[in-house]
Image: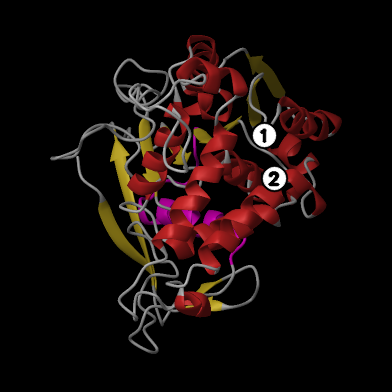
């Protein structure tokens, strides 16, 4: 298994964004797992969350850990690669093999920086649909995503329901709250106020806004865990038992954990991608643009999953999606899963969650088999 890379748009056929702006070169990084049937009817597309990438499952040489959704994807797992052909691609703007603001602008030979056009979640869908065309997959048996990935699934299902037989939306939202926008705003401010940001041209300056990006990650990571998870993992445990009193360093275990999360993030993510992707999430409001009745007419079936301890995208966000779909008579199933791990639950091996996804996708596959 390895990450593939393909150029899907070029000067002769540029990518036209939802804003009307154009990109004359777009490369996409992707991975596939399992075998596509001769009928090409067992494909499942995975849409990744904010800091994800194309490497969703399995191990690459030298990996210290498997792909980010390895708990869900693989032989015998809910997304059984002995039965499904699974595709995962780094999204537009992700800068982990796919074109984004850290990529080279062919017009200047320099990194785009803040000259890269602002993106919408619809643009992620446009690029991934082009990848499916490249792979000669006309229709998806399944489309699955969590968090920002779930938002992509919702956009795709509303915009192109004829291409999606079954959609799985996990721990997502159709409209960010002011609180959610506020969290992202603070993260972006930390990055842009870093002295090494250099108006987005930090790469050309030989710098990186490491302090700002690590703080953004630390703040975001707090929102991914529930209070119960924090208490279970850390409580008020002192990091150094020999410490004799308070200071302004790393006194508590939770501080050490957050600092580690911020530091390791620097080795695998780009600060500009953080700006662009979080801003695309802020403006997402698909039900204002698309009629869910089209989903009902296409016969697309939808599963919506939330977690009771997720306060970043609470169950009410999921219920709002379900209400809009049910009102249009879309065949939709909903389940709130009990889990102590907050928003991060969608990445973990939570048995009732995995059983729900497995049952939904197994029924989808069984329905697709003639006779």
Alpha-carbon span between mark 2 and mark 1: 8 Å
Instruction: Identify the mark at residue 180; answer none if there is no mark.
Output: 2
Q: Position of residue 116 (x, y in %)?
A: 50, 75
Q: In this rendering, is residue 19 above or below 135?
A: below
Mark 2 or mark 1, which is nearer to you? 2
Q: Which of the pair 56/79 is nearer the observer?
A: 56
Q: Are marks 2 and 1 in contact (CB under 8 Å)?
A: yes
Instruction: Identify the mark at residue 313; answer none if there is no mark.
Output: 1
Give the side of residue 319 with respect to residue 165, left or right: right
Give the side of residue 45 with respect to residue 297, left or right: left
Q: Which of the pair 6/179 is nearer the observer?
A: 179
Q: Is residue 50 magenta?
A: no
Mark found first going from the N terminus, 2 or 1:
2
Residue drawn at point x = 59 percent, y = 78 percent:
21
Q: Which of the pair 122/264 is nearer the observer?
A: 264
Please identify the quadrant where the N terminus is shown.
top left
Is label 2 in a helix, a strand or a loop?
Answer: helix
Residue drawn at point x = 75 percent, y = 51 percent:
285
Give the side of residue 238 with respect to residue 181, left or right: left
Q: Position of residue 332 (x, y in %)?
A: 71, 24
Residue drawn at point x = 40 percent, y = 89 percent:
107
Instruction: Identify the mark at residue 5; answer none if there is no mark.
Output: none
Which stretch is magenta?
119-141
Instruction: Give the overall secondary structure of the magenta segment.
Output: helix
Is label 1 in a helix, a strand or a loop?
Answer: loop
Whether residue 94 is visible to the viewer of this picture, yes or no, is: no
Q: Position of residue 136 (x, y in %)?
A: 38, 50
Q: In this rendering, is residue 185 above or below 64?
A: below
Residue drawn at point x = 34 percent, y = 28 percent:
70
Q: Position of residue 83 (x, y in %)?
A: 34, 22
Whether residue 308 is visible to the viewer of this picture, yes or no, is: yes
Q: In this rendering, is residue 302 above or below 355?
A: below
């Amino acid at each position: 298994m390895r990450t593939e890379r393909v150029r899907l748009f070029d000067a002769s056929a540029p990518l036209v964004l939802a804003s009307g702006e154009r990109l004359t070169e777009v490369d996409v990084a992707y991975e596939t797992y399992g075998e596509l049937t001769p009928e090409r009817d067992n494909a499942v597309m995975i849409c990744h969350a904010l800091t994800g990438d194309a490497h969703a499952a399995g191990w690459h040489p030298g990996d210290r850990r498997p792909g980010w959704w390895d708990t869900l994807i693989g032989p015998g797992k809910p997304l059984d690669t002995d039965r499904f052909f699974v595709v995962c691609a780094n999204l537009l703007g992700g800068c982990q093999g796919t074109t984004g603001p850290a990529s080279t602008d062919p017009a200047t030979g320099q990194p785009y920086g803040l000259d890269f056009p602002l993106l919408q979640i619809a643009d992620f869908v446009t690029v991934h649909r082009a990848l499916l065309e490249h792979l000669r997959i006309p229709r998806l048996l399944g489309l699955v995503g969590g968090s920002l990935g779930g938002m992509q699934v919702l956009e795709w299902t509303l915009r192109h329901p004829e291409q999606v037989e079954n959609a799985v939306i996990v721990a997502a939202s159709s409209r960010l709250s002011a609180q959610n926008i506020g969290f992202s705003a603070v993260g972006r401010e930390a990055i842009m106020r870093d002295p090494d940001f250099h108006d987005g041209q930090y790469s050309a300056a030989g710098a990186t806004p490491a302090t700002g990006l690590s703080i953004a990650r630390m703040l975001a990571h707090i929102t991914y865990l529930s209070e119960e998870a924090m208490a279970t993992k850390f409580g008020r445990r002192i990091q150094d038992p020999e410490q004799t009193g308070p200071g302004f360093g790393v006194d508590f275990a939770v501080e050490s954990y957050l600092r580690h999360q911020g530091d390791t993030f620097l080795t695998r993510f780009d600060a500009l991608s953080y700006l662009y992707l979080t801003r695309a999430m802020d403006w997402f409001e698909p039900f204002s643009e698309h009629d869910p009745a089209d989903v009902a007419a296409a016969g697309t079936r939808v599963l919506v999953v939330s977690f009771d301890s997720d306060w970043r995208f609470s169950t009410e966000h999921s219920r709002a999606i379900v209400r809009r779909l049910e009102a249009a008579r879309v065949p939709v199933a909903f389940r709130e899963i009990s889990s102590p791990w907050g928003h991060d639950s969608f990445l973990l091996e939570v048995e009732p969650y995995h059983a729900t996804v497995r049952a939904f996708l197994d029924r989808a596959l069984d329905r697709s088999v003639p006779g």
